[in-house]
Image: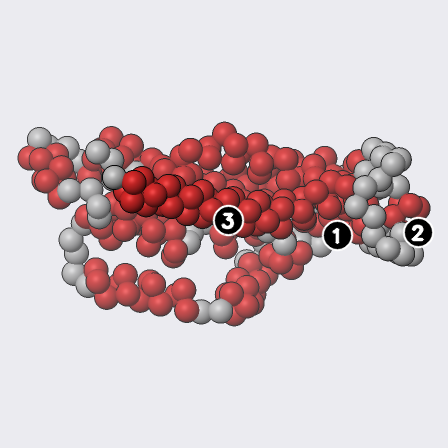
């Protein structure tokens, strides 16, 4: 009896030690992940002079200021860039969903000659380097006369092979019996897609939408390449302009202030939809 009690105590003690080690490692990892955000926020409240006078970076500031946030919105028309980015993000995301949802449905449920071959060729597009795609898109948009337009910004981003593949895999997890029963009842493919498949796969669809929003919001290379008219600049262009507006030196504090402001919408979106994101990633497209 005493030996069993000792064994239980040893197991309990080993579990406690393991738990302590895990929590220590998780705490260290959390500090590593959070530190860049802390440094960004700290830099944004340092004055331009105090930041440039620091030969050794300081991890706290005794004289925080909000002048960098004012500078971020006055040095460049950041509010206009915000509006442009919202327009670009919303339209691109909506158009992409209109394209990829029917495409994923067609590859997952419809039967047509050469479907597997077409899908294989479709997936092979993922093997093409992004640099080659950007060059081709730039030439195409230029030839179509859509430089410095929202159409030129949006058009190359309205589809995604990876998102079609991801959604197709989730659609295929829905039992075929539901589709057959719906067809027996005379339900059209479009109605079945909207009424059955989309609600079941809602977590994955929301996850894809949020990933696309983040992708559009952080877009940098394509907007810089296809637009040189400030009327169509996005927030990424604004950050670059603020960075170069430093009286001969990079205005890092004002740039960090702009980054803080720009990051807020993404943080809010994640907080609101975090449960849907986790559900979409962990459970895929099936329920119950």
Q: Earlier in the sequence, mark 2 or mark 1?
A: 2
Q: Is residue 186 left or right of residue 159?
A: left
Separation (CA) of disc 2 from disc 1: 22 Å
Residue found 89% across the figure and 35% down from its top: 63
Answer above or below: position of 234 versus 121: above
- Write down the quadrant of residue 283 in the picture: top left
The secondary structure type at the circle numbered 2 is loop
Which residue in the protein does label 1 denote?
240
Residue 209 position within the rendered picture, expressed as x and y whole percent measured from the top left? 44, 41
**What is the residue that sits farthest to the left in this orientation?**
184
The span from disc 3 to disc 1 (Cα, nearest Å) is: 43 Å
Q: Secondary structure at mark 1?
A: helix
Tell me which corner region of the image, top left, top right, bottom left or bottom right, holds residue 222: bottom right
In the picture of the structure, the residue carrying the numbered disc 3 is 21
For disc 2, the marked residue is: 53
Specify which label sits upstream in the sequence, 3 or 2: 3
Above/below status of 64 relative to 208? above
Q: Earlier in the sequence, mark 3 or mark 1?
A: 3
Quick one: quadrant of the C terminus?
Answer: top left
Residue 204 appears left or right of 111: right
Circles 3 and 1: CB atoms closer than 8 Å: no
Q: CA distance from mark 3 to mark 2?
A: 40 Å
Residue 212 visible to the viewer: no
Q: Determine whether, in the image, residue 123 is placed left or right of residue 262.
A: left
Q: Secondary structure at mark 3?
A: helix
Q: Nearer the viewer, residue 94 or 261?
A: 261
């Amino acid at each position: 009896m005493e030996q069993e009690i000792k064994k239980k105590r040893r197991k309990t003690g080993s579990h406690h030690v393991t738990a302590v080690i895990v929590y220590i490692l998780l705490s260290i990892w959390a500090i590593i992940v959070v530190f860049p955000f802390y440094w960004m926020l700290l830099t944004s409240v340092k004055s331009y002079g105090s930041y440039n006078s620091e030969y050794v970076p300081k991890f706290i500031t005794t004289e925080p200021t909000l002048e960098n946030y004012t500078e971020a919105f006055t040095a460049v028309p950041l509010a206009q860039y915000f509006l442009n980015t919202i327009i670009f993000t919303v339209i691109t995301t909506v158009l992409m969903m209109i394209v990829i949802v029917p495409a994923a449905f067609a590859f997952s449920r419809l039967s047509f000659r050469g479907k597997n071959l077409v899908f294989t060729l479709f997936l092979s597009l993922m093997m093409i380097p992004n640099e080659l795609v950007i060059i081709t898109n730039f030439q195409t948009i230029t030839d179509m006369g859509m430089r410095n337009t929202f159409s030129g910004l949006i058009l190359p981003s309205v589809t995604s092979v990876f998102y079609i593949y991801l959604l197709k895999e989730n659609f295929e997890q829905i039992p075929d019996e539901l589709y057959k029963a719906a067809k027996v009842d005379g339900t059209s493919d479009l109605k079945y897609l909207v009424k059955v498949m989309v609600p079941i796969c809602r977590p994955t669809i929301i996850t894809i939408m949020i990933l696309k929003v983040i992708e559009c919001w952080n877009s940098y290379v394509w907007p810089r390449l296809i637009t040189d008219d400030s009327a169509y600049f996005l927030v990424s262009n604004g950050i670059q302009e603020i960075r170069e507006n430093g009286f001969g030196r990079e205005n890092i504090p004002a740039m960090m202030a702009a980054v803080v402001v720009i990051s807020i919408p993404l943080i809010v979106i994640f907080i609101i939809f975090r449960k849907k994101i986790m559900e979409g990633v962990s459970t895929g497209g099936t329920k119950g």
